[in-house]
Each structure stands twice: as C-alpha cells, then as structure tokens.
Image: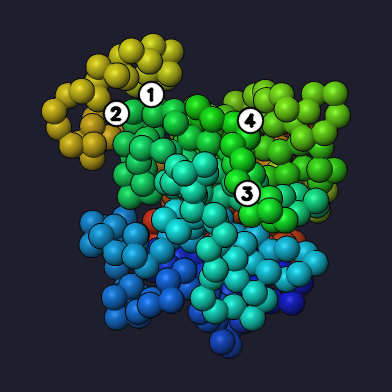
C-alpha cells in the first residue's frame, strides 16, 4: 500500500492493477497497470491470488507488491514481482519499466522498495531461483539467494547492495535516513543496513520476531510497523536450529503444499510496532482472523491503521490508538 497527500491509500492487486481509494461513495478505482496490453477479461476475473488459475496469469498481468510515492515529483514507484522496478506519473496509466536486470542477471522477484532522500531507490529481489508463484518453496526450503538492490535514478544503473539473503521482503528507510530496515521472512527477523555514519555498509539484526514478517512501514513518530504472519511452529524452530534437517525433509518426494501442511503452517495476524532500536512498543493480535488473515502491510494514517493482505480481496481499516 501507499498514500499521497491528496488521495488514497493505493494498493496493488493480484490482477496486476494498482488501485486507489476515492472515498465511500466512489470506492476503489484503477490507477495503474503494469502491462500495456492488460485486459480486464484476462486478468480481473475475480479469482483469488492463491489459486493456480491466477498464478498462470500473473506473470503476464503483473503483480505489484511494493508501492512508494516520490514526495517531490508525485511519481509512484512500484516493485512488481515479474516486471521489476516500475514507475508511473501522478495521473496514473501504464507503468514504465526502470530495472529488470542487474549486470545481465534478471530481477527475478522484486518485492518491496523505499526511496532515499538523494533519489536512490532501494528494493528487494526475494530470490534468484524462484518467482512469486513459488514463494512457498523459498520459505520452506530456507533458500538464500535474495538480494537488496539500489537503483540510481541519474544513471539508470542497478547495484547489488547485499546478496545471499533469506527471503528479503519489506524495505523501510529510517526517518533520519541513517539506516534501512529489511525483513528476512524465512528467518523471522528484521535486519538493519547502515547507510550513514561510522557503521555505514554494516548489516545487523534489528529485531527477532515470533513469526514471518512481510512489509515494514514508518509512522510519523519514526517508529516501525511490521506485518507478521504468526507464529513459528516447533518443527520450524527445529529447522532453524539444524538446517540440514530442513534440507533432508524437503527432499521427500511430495508436493510443497503437502510438506507445508506437514509442518503445520497455520497462521494468524500479528502487528508489531517497534522503536528505533528494535524494541517492541505495542503488539496487536487477531488470532481468529476476524479482521485480517495473511497480512502483508500495516500503515498508520490519520489515526487509523490500514491493513493489507497477500491472499484476500479486501483491505481492513481500524481506529488507532484502540479505544
């Protein structure tokens, strides 16, 4: 999700569109598409993002995941899982491709992004082996070929900042621009990469979490909201401690879906608010899935939380602080 000063919020959908909220009377309207030949008949047929039918279409239709507005130009920058780093003007329309490869290697699974005050765009490439439709393989295998990338707007060059990452996902630059946070979903943690100061270029664990984090978003106080699918099961704890067992387990000749069920991956929603040092400020839970399941992002705007999901056809909003 993203928001600008005049309208929104904006959200990326499984059918390849970016839509924006126009208020209770109008509802959602299409703002941008990734493919100039995008077709409502082909892409927007109401199927959910978790079905094989939609998986077969999303490589063509697009799958916009990370959204960020440039404060000065009004442009919307998009991390699309298949089309890479994209941009569209403040009036919307068909997005333009900015980066689909790094040194000749494809950006295989662009996931999220943030914009530095100097114009550089940092974004994650979750895996160099698997695409978004096979994200369960990345998670269950513990596959670690992900990258943090930087796009230089002046030259159009893409640079590898970090590689060998395990399911790098959400990206958020701190309010003072001193460091950048990114989630490592499989490892259930938030990492900090220093951009400025004596530790520039160093990476460290910012927060260990009880579940699988997706996007990280800043609030007006400089704190960080993290959307988490909770929680790690005992089996997953064993895999984290002895990775060789994970390797052996996933050589069993059955489907990934079956293997996932065998490790009891039953998730519920957890939203965590962290301070600038990774300490927990507040935790909101939804164990019964009454508000949202499989959360992807939470944004705090005008005393409300807007909560997105990777798997369902709605966005939730609740008052915040809670009464």
Q: Which quadrant of the rendered structure holds the N terminus?
A: bottom right
Q: Which mark is first along the chain, 1 or 2? A: 1
Determine contact: label 2, label 4, CB under 8 Å: no
State the residue position of label 4.
Answer: 191
The kind of secondary structure element at disc 4 is: strand
Determine contact: label 3, label 4, CB under 8 Å: no
In front: mark 1 or mark 3?
A: 3
State the residue position of label 1.
Answer: 236
The kind of secondary structure element at disc 2 is: loop
Residue 120 in picture, x, y percent from top left? 72, 50
- Quadrant assignment, res 249: top left
The kind of secondary structure element at disc 3 is: loop
- Give the residue displayed 52% in from the left and 41% down from the top: 103
Q: Which mark is first along the chain, 4 or 3? A: 3
- Give the residue displayed 60% in from the left and 46% down from the top: 158
Q: CA distance from mark 2 to mark 4?
A: 26 Å
Q: Which mark is first along the chain, 3 or 1? A: 3
**Would you call the spot at circle 1 few (<14 residues within 10 Å), some (14-19), or many (20 or more)?**
some
- Quadrant assignment, res 159: top right
**Would you call the spot at circle 4 few (<14 residues within 10 Å), some (14-19), or many (20 or more)?**
many
The kind of secondary structure element at disc 1 is: helix
Counting labels gives: 4
Determine contact: label 2, label 1, CB under 8 Å: yes
């Amino acid at each position: 999700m993203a928001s600008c000063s005049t309208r929104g919020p904006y959200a990326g959908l499984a059918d390849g569109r970016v839509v924006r909220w126009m208020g209770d009377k109008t509802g959602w309207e299409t703002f941008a598409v990734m493919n100039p030949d995008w077709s409502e008949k082909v892409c927007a047929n109401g199927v959910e993002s978790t079905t094989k039918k939609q998986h077969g279409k999303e490589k063509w239709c697009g799958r916009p995941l990370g959204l960020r507005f440039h404060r000065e130009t009004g442009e919307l920058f998009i991390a699309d899982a298949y089309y890479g780093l994209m941009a569209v003007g403040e009036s919307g329309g068909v997005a333009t491709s900015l980066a689909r490869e790094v040194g000749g290697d494809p950006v295989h699974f662009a996931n999220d992004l943030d914009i530095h005050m100097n114009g550089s765009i940092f974004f994650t490439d979750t895996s160099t082996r698997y695409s978004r439709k096979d994200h369960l393989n990345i998670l269950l295998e513990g596959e670690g070929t992900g990258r943090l990338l930087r796009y230089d707007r002046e030259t159009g060059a893409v640079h590898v900042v970090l590689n060998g990452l395990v399911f790098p996902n959400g990206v958020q630059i701190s309010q003072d621009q001193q460091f950048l946070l990114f989630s490592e979903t499989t490892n259930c943690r938030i990492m900090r990469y220093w951009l400025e100061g004596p530790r520039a270029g160093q990476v460290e664990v910012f927060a260990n979490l009880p579940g699988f984090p997706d996007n990280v978003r800043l609030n007006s106080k400089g704190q960080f909201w993290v959307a988490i699918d909770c929680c790690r099961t005992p089996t997953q704890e064993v895999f984290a401690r002895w990775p060789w067992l994970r390797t052996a387990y996933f050589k069993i000749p059955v489907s990934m879906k079956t293997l996932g069920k065998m490790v009891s991956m039953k998730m519920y929603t957890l939203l965590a608010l962290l301070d600038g040092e990774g300490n927990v400020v507040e935790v909101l839970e939804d164990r019964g899935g009454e508000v949202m399941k499989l959360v992807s992002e939470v944004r705090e705007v005008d005393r409300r939380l807007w909560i997105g999901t990777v798997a369902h056809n709605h966005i939730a909003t609740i008052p915040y602080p809670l009464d």
